[in-house]
Amino acid sequence: MDILNSPNNILLQVLSDDEKRSIFDKYGEAGLKGAGAGMGDFSNPFDLFESLFEGMGGVTGMGSRSSRNRPTQGDDESYNLVLNFKEAVFGVEKEIEITRLENCGTCDGSGAKPGTKSTKCSTCGGQGQVVSSARTPLGVFQQVMTCSTCGGTGESFTPCNTCGGDGRIRKSKRISLKVPAGVDSGSRLRVRSEGNTGRRGGPPGDLYVFIEVLSDPVLKRDGNNILYTCKISYIDAILGTTISVPTVDGTVDLKIPAGTQPGTTLVMAKKGVPYLGKQSARGDELVRVQVEIPKRLSSEEKKLIEELASLSNAKTANSRR
Ligand SMILES: [Zn+2]
Ligand SMILES: [Zn+2]
């Protein structure tokens, strides 16, 4: 994976198909957590313990309820952005509308109904901890656990009507996005802190913008090079000519040298795609020359070709002598 710094607090990551597939398999569309996340990524020792505890089948509902009132980091959010061919080549500034969880204005993110007072948690009696026991092959273990009802705060509250106690609600927001020159289908832009806001004042997640580039009817992209195929007549191939070639910079004249062979590739230097992160360096446009042989000839043309043929036969006969 290539990671490049670019303006606007955006990290650009170019993922291979395999990397993309594994991220989607693991987290789905909405839950991208960066390529390296997974098991072992526990920021809080309680998370690790609770997962193990759940794995033993000891206490049900432990993982989800207990984190309810603690500050937790918001999830990452994803957005699919479709660009046309030239926008991807030269970069573009786009305004996009994203939806994500933001702090609830009614309860100011606390999740408690305004005007209500929190009361002592009845499960733990306000201690924030409970003693749990688990039977294992080595005997019964007793463990002091964070109270799952109040999440260790020792308080219980009436949930806010607007957000249902979560402290966050889904809102849409327009953000301006600077897409750097040289992106391609599969490029991923990471916009820091524009994901879902964290619970109870926790830090926000990131926004990942997945890029898809529409194809162009005549120009094909091959990494940083652009491929184009032109057709010339056999006479132009023999005598040479100048043709007009479409490029991302507009139409440009290209000299076809006399004696150009069918299938020759001519290089138009620096008419390709800028390299990501170093806009001054560009790929080339590669022009493949197809030579058209006529299927029918006028009687006059046929006569001339036959003259050419006898001329060339005489030449061959001379050289054999
Ligand atoms: Zn609320
Ligand atoms: Zn409690």
Image (spheres, grey):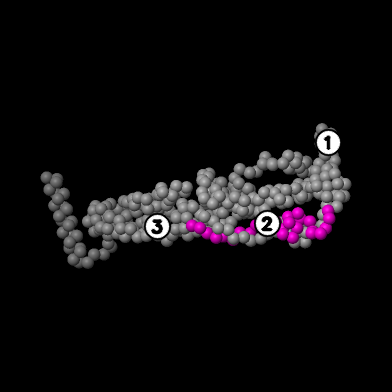
Sequence-earlier tag: 1 or 3: 1
Q: Closer to us: mark 1 or mark 2?
A: 2
Q: Does residue 232 appear to the left or right of 283 in the view shown?
A: left
At label 2, the amino acid type is Glu
Q: Is 95 left or right of 274, judged from the image as shown?
A: right
Which residue corresponds to the image point at 75% horizontal and 48% vertical from the top-left?
70
User: Counting other residues with Cα less than 10 Å from the Cα at mark 2, is it few (<14), some (14-19), or many (20 or more)?
Assistant: many
**Going by the picture, which residue comes out furthest to the top?**
138
Q: Name the residue under label 3.
A: 248
Q: In which quarter of the image is residue 233?
A: bottom left
Q: What residue type is labelled 3?
A: Val
Q: Which of the marked residues, 3 or 2, is nearer the chain's N terminus?
A: 2
Can residue 17 be seen here? The reply is no
> Quick one: SS at disc 2?
strand
- Per the model, the C-alpha gap separating discs 1 and 2 is 41 Å
Quadrant housing the C terminus: top left
Q: Which residue lies furthest to the front in this view?
A: 115
Residue to which mark 1 is pinned: 141
User: Looking at the picture, how far across and down is residue 238, in whole percent?
Assistant: 23, 55
Q: Which segment is the magenta one?
A: 92-118
Q: In which quarter of the image is residue 229?
A: bottom left
- 102 vs 311, left or right, is right
Q: Which of 239 and 321 is in front in this view?
A: 239
User: To which residue does mark 2 refer?
Assistant: 102
Q: Which amino acid does label 1 sit on?
A: Phe
Magenta stretch: includes residue 316: no
- The yes-or-no answer for disc 1 within 8 Å of ligand 2 is no
Judge depth for marks 3 and 2 and give the one in front.
2
Q: Which residue is drawn at 37% across and 56% down?
A: 228
